[in-house]
Image (spheres, helix red, strand yellow):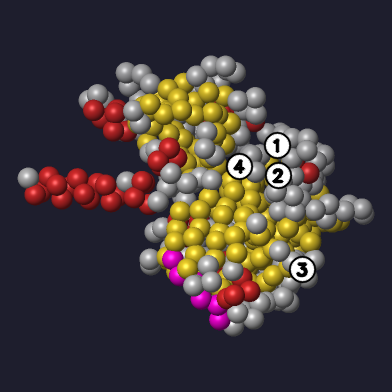
């Protein structure tokens, strides 16, 4: 009896609900199978907002998803979702774009006003069905990819993983009227990382990238761009692939080139990482910005992604200068709330159900937050009623509670508006 009780307690501690996430959204963090007698479509959604999708023929797709209280964005697909007994039903919304979603575009439901039910792992196993994901019965055929014109006949090639390391860094292009800046930061995996696109028109797009064999894919969670890329020591040449589809009005859709002719970005950021060497420490991968001296912070309309504007803020003298309630929108579907009390306690939450509470200290113009074993450290600057937080070299959050999800994360700065 004691063993059964202990096992039940361990299961409860390992469930998403124990992480302080809203129950409705916690149920998204699971493995699902399209309703049927055997495994066809296999979908895994994780707490860190990454997903893995496997088709009936074994083809696989990975990426990031964004969820609100009732809606889900996943690789260009947009669904309303409802739960019943841990199973989830997806229904396309008018924003759903299966034609531009690659493998995810083949996943049911594919027709407007249709629905598809996905069975949770626990219910699938209760029915006595095999939970093994689909596997391809034939060896994959390597695609024949058109090679772009190489700017340098000897690009920076890594002997370890075959990646052109010159693809990382910050690159700029000017069309004579507007300037476009694209930052590519390497991640832990050999061919993946994060990107930040800042056009001089104001709006900003961020997300993840995947690079392999001369092909670069940028995915903001709402839109994907696909380019052939040739790397040289001081530049990148982009050529739109046939699969690259533009979305009018979308920030990432404005990233040049928007025509089919090749276009060259000049390197302005950090030099490429050394051949065969991958950064292992967050401080090596994310540039650190001094919040007092830096001239760029995130501001802008709440309905849009952040806009980069000159900073006029200054570091407060004490914790008392930071006390208040603040909000920030890292993307159109999510709102973060942050409250700092005069007694040195804080609370953080977002509309996805993330929650964290703990203690705060303010030393040397740096705000230090601690919730259980997770610690965050930000440079802090006040601009009127807004609070700008900037990641420092010491900010290396562990993904063990929801404080790790607090912005800034992919972006180096986040501006919280005071209520």
Q: Is residue 81 left or right of residue 203?
A: left
* Residue at the extreme left: 1
Local crowd size for mark 2, using a 10 Å CA cut-off: few (<14), some (14–19), many (≥20): few
Circle 1: element type = loop
Q: Earlier in the sequence, mark 4 or mark 2?
A: 2
Read off the residue under disc 2: 303
264 w.r.t. 128: above or below: below
- State the count of labels: 4
Residue range in magenta is 358-363
Local crowd size for mark 4, using a 10 Å CA cut-off: few (<14), some (14–19), many (≥20): some
Local crowd size for mark 1, using a 10 Å CA cut-off: few (<14), some (14–19), many (≥20): some
Tag 2–tag 3 contact (CB < 8 Å) = no
Tag 4–tag 2 contact (CB < 8 Å) = no
Q: CA distance from mark 4 to mark 2?
A: 9 Å
Circle 4: element type = loop
Q: CA distance from mark 2 to mark 1?
A: 26 Å
Q: Nearer the viewer, mark 3 or mark 1?
A: 3
Residue displayed at 42% across by 22% down: 117
Read off the residue under disc 1: 244
Q: Earlier in the sequence, mark 4 or mark 1?
A: 1
Read off the residue under disc 3: 311
């Amino acid at each position: 009896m004691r063993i059964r009780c202990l096992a039940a307690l361990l299961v409860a501690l390992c469930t998403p609900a124990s992480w302080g996430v809203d129950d409705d959204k916690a149920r998204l963090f699971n493995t699902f199978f399209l309703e049927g007698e055997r495994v066809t479509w296999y979908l895994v959604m994780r707490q860190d907002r990454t997903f893995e999708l496997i088709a009936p023929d074994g083809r696989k797709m990975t990426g990031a998803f964004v969820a609100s209280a009732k809606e889900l964005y996943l690789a260009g697909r947009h669904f309303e979702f409802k739960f019943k007994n841990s199973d989830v039903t997806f229904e396309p919304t008018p924003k759903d774009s299966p034609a531009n979603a690659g493998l995810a575009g083949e996943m049911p439901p594919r027709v407007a006003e249709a629905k598809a039910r996905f069975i949770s792992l626990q219910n699938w196993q209760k029915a006595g069905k095999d939970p093994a994901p689909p596997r391809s019965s034939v060896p994959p055929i390597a695609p024949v990819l058109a090679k772009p014109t190489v700017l340098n006949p000897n690009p920076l090639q890594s002997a370890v993983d075959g990646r052109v390391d010159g693809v990382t860094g910050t690159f700029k292009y000017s069309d004579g009227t507007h300037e476009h800046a694209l930052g590519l930061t390497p991640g832990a995996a050999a061919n993946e990382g994060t990107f930040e696109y800042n056009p001089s028109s104001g709006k900003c797009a961020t997300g993840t990238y995947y690079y392999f064999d001369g092909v670069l894919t940028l995915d903001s969670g709402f839109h994907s761009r696909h380019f052939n890329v040739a790397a040289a020591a001081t530049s990148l040449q982009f050529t739109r692939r046939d699969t690259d589809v533009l979305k009018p009005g979308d920030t990432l859709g404005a990233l040049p080139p928007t025509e089919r002719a090749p276009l060259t970005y000049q390197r302005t950021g950090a030099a490429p990482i050394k051949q065969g060497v991958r950064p292992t420490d967050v401080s090596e991968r994310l540039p650190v910005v001094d919040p007092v001296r830096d001239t760029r912070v995130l501001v802008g309309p709440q309905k849009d992604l952040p806009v980069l504007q000159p900073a006029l803020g200054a570091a407060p003298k004490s914790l008392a200068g930071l006390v208040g309630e603040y909000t920030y929108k890292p993307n159109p579907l999510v709102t973060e709330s942050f409250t700092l009390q005069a007694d040195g306690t804080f609370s953080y939450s977002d509309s996805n159900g993330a929650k964290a509470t703990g203690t705060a200290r303010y030393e040397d113009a740096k705000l230090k937050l601690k919730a259980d074993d997770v610690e965050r450290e930000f440079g802090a600057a006040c601009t009127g009623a807004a609070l700008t937080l900037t990641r420092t070299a010491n900010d290396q959050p562990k993904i063990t509670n929801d404080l790790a999800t607090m912005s800034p994360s992919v972006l180096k700065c986040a501006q919280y508006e005071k209520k």
